[in-house]
Amino acid sequence: MGTSGSPGRVADIFEELAREHRVTGAQLALYRDGALTEHTVGVESVRTKNPVTADTAFPFGSVTKFFTAGLIMQFVSDGDLDLDEPLSGLVPELKRATNPLLGTCTVRQLLSHTAGLADSIEYADMRGPSYRRFATVCGEEPNLFPPGLAFSYSNTGYCLLGSVIEAVSGMDWWTAMDSCLLRPLGIEPAFLHDPRPGADQPARTRAEGHAIRAGSDEAEPVDHMTALSLAAAGGLAGSARDLVTTARLHLDDRDTFAHRHLLPEDAILQMRDSVPDAEPFGLADAWGLGLMCHRNGDDAWFGHDGAVGGATCNLRIHPGSSTALAVTTNSTAGPKLWEDLVRELRANGLDLGHYSLPHPEAPQVGDLGDYLGSYTNGDLLLMVVADASGELFLTREDYSDYLLTIHEDDLFVARDRVHDALPIIGRFVRERAGGPVALLQYGGRALQRRG
C-alpha cells in the first residue's frame, strides 16, 4: 500500500473537492504513521451559518452498524453471548413468532446480513427506549429466504441486534452503547433520537442535512428521515475523529492505543473474517461481522459507508499499515465528494481500498418487457414501468422516477432526473440462463419479483 502524500496535500484535495461539489459542510480525519490529522470545511447548516468544527456531530447513518457490531463482540468476548446461538433462545418475543424461521437466525447471520431478513419494516415508532416491541413486530414478518442462504443487506437485522443487546445486558441499546463503548473510548455520545428521560438537550452540536437539486447552486435543508426504531442500524452521530478513534481498535498498532482492552484481538479478527458464499453486490467485495471488505489485489481494506437524508459518512481501515480514514458530510453531494476523494488520494499515494461498481456502456437491445413489474423487499416496493415512448423507469412511491437503462448481463443504470446524485447501478437476476427475471439487486439488497 502506498503511503506517500503529505497531510497538507490531503487537506488541499479535500477542500478543493468540497468546493467543486458544493458540499455544505464536511470533516476528514486521517490516522497514519501514529498521528491524527483533521480537516473541516463549510457550515453545519445554511440556516445558522455556524462553521463545521472537529467536534460537530454528523449522522453516521449505516456506519452505526460498525459500532453495534463492536458492542455485540464485547458481549461475545465476555462470554455473555454466543455468535451461533439462535435468536429464539435470546429474545423472548421470538419464541412464539408467527415466522418460525426468524427464531432460527443466529447472531452471526444478523451481523453478516445473511439471515434472510427484509431490509426494513414499517411500524409506529417505539414508545420508549426498548426493542422488545420491534422484535414482536419482526416475528410477524416473513423471511426473504432461509437463514444462511445468501446476502441481503438488512437494517432490520441490526435492529434485532438491539433486542439481543437488551437481552444480554439488561440495558437499552442507547445506554449500552453509551456506557460500554462510546464513553470508554472517550467519545461524547450523540444520537439522532434519544428517547431516554432527560436526553432532550444534546451535549453536542449536530450538523443539519442538505440537498442539492440538479441545476441549482443552493443547498436546501432536509430532514434526516431516520425513525427511532432504526437506532441500532443507523441512529448514531459523531465526528470523523470519533470514527477514527473507534477504528484504532482494528489497527496493527493497537498496542499503542490506551483503549485496546475494550475489544480483544480475537474479536477484531472475527469481525474482519469474510463470510463464505455471501456476495454483497453493489456494496463491497466481501462482508464480515459488521465490516465490509474492499480488496485491492492481494491487499484488503475494511470499513463501512452510511447515508441518511442529506448526510453521508465513509470509513476505511487498513490494519497492516495502521491507517484509518473517515469522512463525514451534511450534503447529498457527499457520495460524489467521496468517489473523487478516493481517486485523488490514490493518485497521491494513499491507495484506499474501494469497491468499484461495473460501469456498463451502451444500453442492451432486447425485450425490455422482461423487466417490467414489481419488486419487493419487506416494505420496500420498486416498480419497473415503461412510458408511451418505450423508455423504462424505476419508480418508488413518494420518490422521483429514475430513468432506467438495461445493459449486458442484465446490469442496469438508474439516473435521478431531479437531484444532482450519482446513478444507481444494479442488476436483474434470472431464475436460470435465458429464463425469467426473479430478483432485482442494488446496494447489497435483493428484491423479489412479484409480477
Image (cartoon, rainbow, N blue to C red):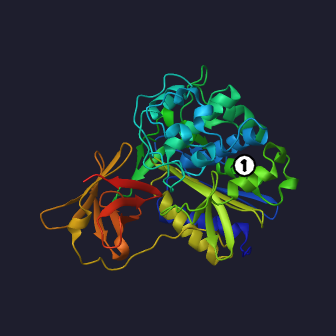
Question: Which quarter of the rendered picture does the N terminus lie within?
Answer: bottom right
* Residue at screen point 35% across, 73% down: 433
Q: Quadrant of residue 166?
A: top right
* Residue at screen point 36% across, 42% down: 379
Question: Which quarter of the rendered picture does the C terminus lie within?
Answer: bottom left
**Amino acid, disc 1:** Thr
Coordinates of residue 406 in the picture (x, y in percent)? 30, 71
Nearer the observer, 41 or 121: 121
Query: Is residue 9 among the parts visible in the rendering?
Result: yes
Image vertical order of residue 215 relative to residue 87, above or below: below
Q: Is residue 102 left or right of residue 447?
A: right
Mark 1, residue position = 246
Q: Is residue 236 left or right of residue 368?
A: right
Tag 1 secondary structure:
helix
Nearer the observer, 93 or 310: 93
* Residue at screen point 41% across, 51% down: 211
Coordinates of residue 400 in the picture (x, y in percent)? 29, 53
Q: Quadrant of residue 435?
A: bottom left
Coordinates of residue 178 in the picture (x, y in percent)? 69, 33
Image vertical order of residue 209 relative to residue 227, above or below: below
